[in-house]
Image (cartoon, rainbow, N blue to C red):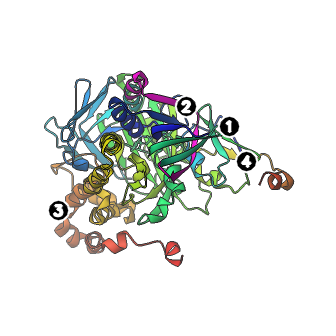
Amino acid sequence: MANQYDIVVVGAGPAGLMVSQIAAKKGLKVLLVDQKKDIPKILRSCCCNLIIEPGTHKEVVTYSSGEIRFQNNNFVVPYAGSVIPLKNSFKVSPGGQALTIKGKSPEGNVAISYEKEALVNGLFSIVQKNKNIEILCGLQAVKAENVKGGVKVTFRDREKNFTFEGKVAVAADGVNSKVVETLGLNEKRRKFFARFRVCSFHMENVDCPYPDSWITFVGTGHTRTKRGQLYMCPKPHEGITDPPVYELTLGVPVAATVEAVSTRDELDYFTTKGRFSGWFKNMKIVDVRAATLNFYTPLINPIEGNVVVVGDSAAFIETYVQGAMMYGFQAGNAIVKYLSTGSGLEDYADAWKESFEYNDPEEIKRASQGFGLHVLKDHDIDYLFGLTRGDDIRGYVNEFSDPITTRTALLSHLDQIKKERPELGAVLEKFSQVSVDDALQVDSRKKKH
Amino acid sequence: MQIDIDKCVGCGGCVNLCPQIAIHFFDNKACIDQFRCTECRTCVIACGMGAPNVSCRFPQAIIFTEA
Ligand SMILES: Cc1cc2nc3c(=O)[nH]c(=O)nc-3n(C[C@H](O)[C@H](O)[C@H](O)COP(=O)(O)OP(=O)(O)OC[C@H]3O[C@@H](n4cnc5c(N)ncnc54)[C@H](O)[C@@H]3O)c2cc1C
């Protein structure tokens, strides 16, 4: 027996909580379902920095006294937790040279570190108070189908399947969205890059020489497999900011055929035997989180029939927490309009196409150029970062602009590099010449079909 | 396959990636339905924590009856 709701929302992360809240406030009947038992409990890795660079997703996001403000969309989200403003972004080379990016915001910040659990807790308590929202925990969505008059979503628990029907369904089940997969939408994406495995340690007593900063460990020698990206930053932990808990995160692409070394073992290695193990001599792990993520280009169209795809479900993890909330806000409003007037979903689709960076292939190209650092040898990175000592580089923690900031900083020394290290100069110049086609090459596997 | 719950941190990565829909979330940890699992090892490759392991091999008969 099918159950009828206005909206069935799959996933109670930042995106799903936001859609539910907006729709229920306008009187719509919402069913919100998550596979977790405790919705506000964060189990998955997320560095959780507020990206404060104006213009990110065509929005300006600021934090002050208990509120995250979305200026252009004109709404606020309460945040009752603590924050740590990050002053610098350090890229540390294997030999310990640092490329330093100083905060460009008026307050001199590169980003603001906050606690996801406190944010989600706040959103969840708003949702819990609204009588129009029914919440079900511990149910996993396994399939969504557009049917006459709405969408049928199949869930299951340990033993049984349950079917719920909504006039509209929202896929907010995150980066490996089952809803998106079962609707066949992954087939329509421009490209599948790789699967990433992530692990993070939250640690007390880290002897970090770069306080209040976002740190990226660049180079290949940090892990035994010589692969992956490593980040570290201080985090408020259960409201406490001083002394901070440090979060160290490793992300590694995995080939489907290789059973790679465990990411947890790699972090153990980095903290006990790695080049910077001295920082971790006295550390104590207070939390371990992980993630496994399929890395696709974004959905070009986030609407399929009456299914609206929001947040990471539509775009790897690049929507960020704030984007998940912003697109949740926009999708919620579009659904309200659609259910009262019969049209309006396109408003959300248009906003998505217009504002999400990686819908523009040129942006993907720019990103791939910057991350060209990974083709360099460790000693080259030491040399290059050494050249930037004393430079006044300003920027933000933001994957959309950081590659350009870094590349510009290095290229400002191109004449010297070409003179001293002509081969390296040539490699650097080549970064600027990646074509969109190269950046977005269709998988050869896909081409065959 | 079985999940070592001491190693699983409950990130949910394997849950949506399992092609047999054999993994569900139970008590914020991954849990593998032995009747659905075909030991395809997708979860082993997906998991960075080394939580899934081959500690039981089901008789073919059971898999066939279930399918
Ligand atoms: C390593 C890492 C670092 C990051 N760093 C940052 C950062 O610094 N700043 C930032 O803003 N963002 C960061 N992000 C991204 C951020 O975590 C996401 O963009 C954000 O959480 C997306 O929110 P969402 O609501 O779309 O999805 P999620 O937060 O993933 O929520 C999805 C929800 O759906 C549930 N779910 C999943 N599948 C099902 C199913 N089949 N059935 C029912 N429920 C299901 C999950 O339990 C979860 O509650 C990072 C992510 C990672 C992995």
Mark 4 residue type: Met
Of mark 1 and mark 3, the one earlier in the sequence is: 1
Where residue B27 appears, as percent x and y from the top left, is 62, 31
Q: Quadrant of the C terminus of chain A?
A: bottom right
**Would you say residue A128 sits in the magenta stretch?**
yes
Asked which secondary structure carries label 1, the reply is: loop
Mark 2 residue type: Cys
Magenta part of the chain:
A123-149
Q: Quadrant of the N terminus of chain A?
A: top right
In the rendered structure, the answer to whether residue A67 lies left or right of residue A373 reads left
The nearer-to-camera label among 4 and 1 is 1
Using the image, determine if residue A250 lies above or below residue A436: above
Mark 1 residue type: Arg
Q: Are marks 4 and 3 in contact (CB under 8 Å)?
A: no
Q: Are marks 3 and 2 in contact (CB under 8 Å)?
A: no
Please give the residue where the numbered disc 3 appears in the rendered image.
Answer: A412
Rate crowding at label 1 as few (under 14), some (14 to 19) or many (20 or more) other CA atoms within 10 Å.
some
Please give the residue where the numbered disc 4 appears in the rendered image.
Answer: B1
Q: Specify whether tag 1 is near ligand 1 (CB below 8 Å).
A: no
